[in-house]
Each structure stands twice: as structure tokens, then as C-alpha cells.
Image (cartoon, rainbow, N blue to C red):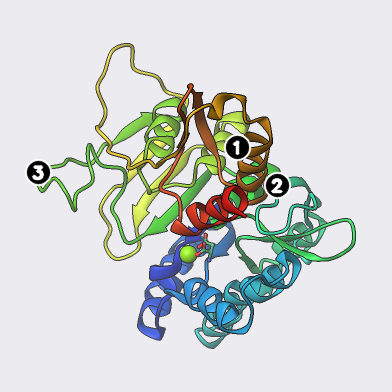
Amino acid sequence: MDTIVLKFGGSSVASYERLKMVANKIIDFYDKNNNTVVIVSAQGKTTDRLIKESEEISKDPSDREMDVLLSSGEQMSMAKLSMLLNEMGYPAVSLTGWQAGIYTNNTNQNAIIENIDATRIKKELAERKIVIIAGFQGFNENLDITTLGRGGSDTTAIAIAATLEAKNCYIFSDVEGVYSADPNMIKVAKKIPALSYKEMLAMANEGARVLNNRSIEIGEKFGIPIISKSTFNNESGSVISNVIEEETIKGIVKKDLSRISIVGNGIIRNTKAIRRILEVIENSKIDMLNLDVTETKISIDFKNVVPNELVSKIHEVIFN
Ligand code: ASP
Ligand code: MG
């Protein structure tokens, strides 16, 4: 019997109507006699909403409590989907990160999966259950809940697929696959039927948002074909695998980056200021790309657009 992993993103599970479409997709796979494992994200904008609500309570809530809060979004989705499948006459069971054996390191808010003990998942599959797992969450050595960073449900799905040696990992979302350019920007962009892990990783790192980059690395490492497809139609999606074309052009991506510069004569010798600035950046866990120091200026390039809050924190340490 083949094992299939299906992941449904936030917009795919956003409402009862959509959950029904998702349930029917799951049933299609299950009825073909597949071991069916499903990973879900939080419904719609739930995670964003929870973050906003936490900000109303505290300017700087602990990462541990943020993980407890944010992981609740995925738990709502998994319970609702499992209930719905049961209601439709199908045996389903929902599992949290720890119930599914997803063991991570201690980095709350941005944890890395270290190991998956799939005993419980396999037991449920052996009983012919559809196993629904909360994406984006795991547990650490203190038995605390951890989360894998924004968009982390893709990582959960592909890591579970690797552990179960699944035939494929389907990533269902509101887009039909990977496009030659962002279809919101370029109307004539075309869907790419197949691309290699390396090509997909380059697209994701340079700004394409279809798949989370860590998940692609895991897919490549374990050779799990990833299929990006729409929840809302039956069009063929994009297959990401180790099939490589000799010479090809797949897509074009645009990414907005940030540069922060601090100006003042002799800054190159102001080691105290430089150290403080670097400390602020390190504490905010924002990825730097490049640092350039001259007689009158320090310029720091970042891998993404950074929040204005970073500028205000740097301002604080250099002027106070
Ligand atoms: N719900 C989490 C987020 O919005 C994880 C995910 O959707 O993959 O970032
Ligand atoms: Mg999400």
C-alpha cells in the first residue's frame, strides 16, 4: 500500500465550505487504498490574528508562550477536519505535534525538526485511519510546544513524508503550482509542469512564496517528490523532484530587500557602536546578507524586508 501525504494551507481550510472540498480530496486518495496522512495549517488568517492579539497584551511576550498560542490555530483545523470526515462516514484521527512524535530543538518560534517517532502515526494507519496532523508544531526536550517559523506546515508535511517514506507529498493551496513569474504581477505567467529541487529552492530563496524553503531542502535530502496543486480545481500542478533538465529557463522572481545604514565620521573605528548594532540584529533573529564598513558609513543588507522596529532598536542603542 502506498503512503501519501497531503498538506492543505490556511486558505484551503478557511471555512466550512472549503473544509468540505478538502475532505472530498482526502477521500479520493483514501478510497484508492492509500495510507493517507494529512497536514493542516491554521484556518485563513488565524495565525496573523493571534499575533495581533498577543501584541495587545504584551510588547515582548515570551517565545515559549507565543508557541503555545500560535500552535492552537492548527489544532482547531485538525479537529474540525477530523470531525467532518467522521461525519461523512470516514475514520479519521487528529494528532498534535507531540502526539505525532515531532521532536524539535529548543528554538521557540523557529524550531528545527530533529527527529520524528512515527509509532503513533503508523499505528493509526494500520487501523486504516486517515491521520490528520497539525502542521507547524512540535515539542522539545522539556516537553514544551515549539513552532517551526512562519509557513512551517510545509516543513511538517515533507518531514513526515520523508519519515514514512511516502510516495509523494502533495502541497495543496490556492495556487495551481509554481509559475514562471508571480501571476499577480505578470498576467501571462505560465505554470511550470516540472522543476528540480535546486531550481525550486532558488526560486523560493529569491522570493517565490509557493513553498517554504526548508521544506524543499528536506524533500531533496530524502528524495520525496513534491506536487504543488490547487485545492479548488483538478488541474495538474507542478512536480518538484530530482529530475534535472540540462539547459532550461524556469522562471523569474523579484525580491525586495532592506539596507540599513548608519552614518558618522570615523565610524569604522567605533567598535563599541558596531558591536551594539550587531547584537541588536542577532537578538532580533533577522538574517543579514552583507556588512559593509567605511570611514563614514556602516551599511547592512538583509535577506528580506525588515520591520521599522529594527531601525528604532538600532537608533536606541547608538544614541542612548
Ligand atoms: N499557520 C502558520 C503560519 O501562518 C504555519 C503555516 O501556515 O504553515 O505561518
Ligand atoms: Mg498559514
Left or right side of 284 for 185 = left
Q: Which amino acid does label 2 sit on?
A: Ile
Q: Which residue is drawn at 53% across and 36% down?
A: 288
Q: Which residue is drawn at 43% across and 64% down?
A: 28
Mark 1 residue element: helix
Is residue 230 at least partly visible in the picture? yes
Q: In which quarter of the image is residue 120?
A: bottom right
Where in the figure is residue 106, as x and y percent of width and height? 80, 53
Q: Which amino acid does label 1 sit on?
A: Ile
Left or right side of 101 for 205 = left
In primary-sequence order, the first of circles 1 and 3 is 3
Q: How far apart are marks 1 and 3 (CA)?
A: 31 Å
**Within 10 angstroms of label 3, few (less than 14), some, or many (20 or more) residues?**
few
Where in the figure is residue 206, as x and y percent of width and height? 38, 35
Disc 2: which residue: 112
Is residue 1 at least partly visible in the picture? no
In primary-sequence order, the first of circles 3 and 2 is 2
**Within 10 angstroms of label 1, few (less than 14), some, or many (20 or more) residues?**
some
Disc 1: which residue: 218
Mark 2 residue element: loop
Q: How far apart are marks 3 and 2 (CA)?
A: 38 Å
Q: Which residue is drawn at 53% across and 26% down?
A: 266
Q: Which of 282 and 262 is in front in this view?
A: 262
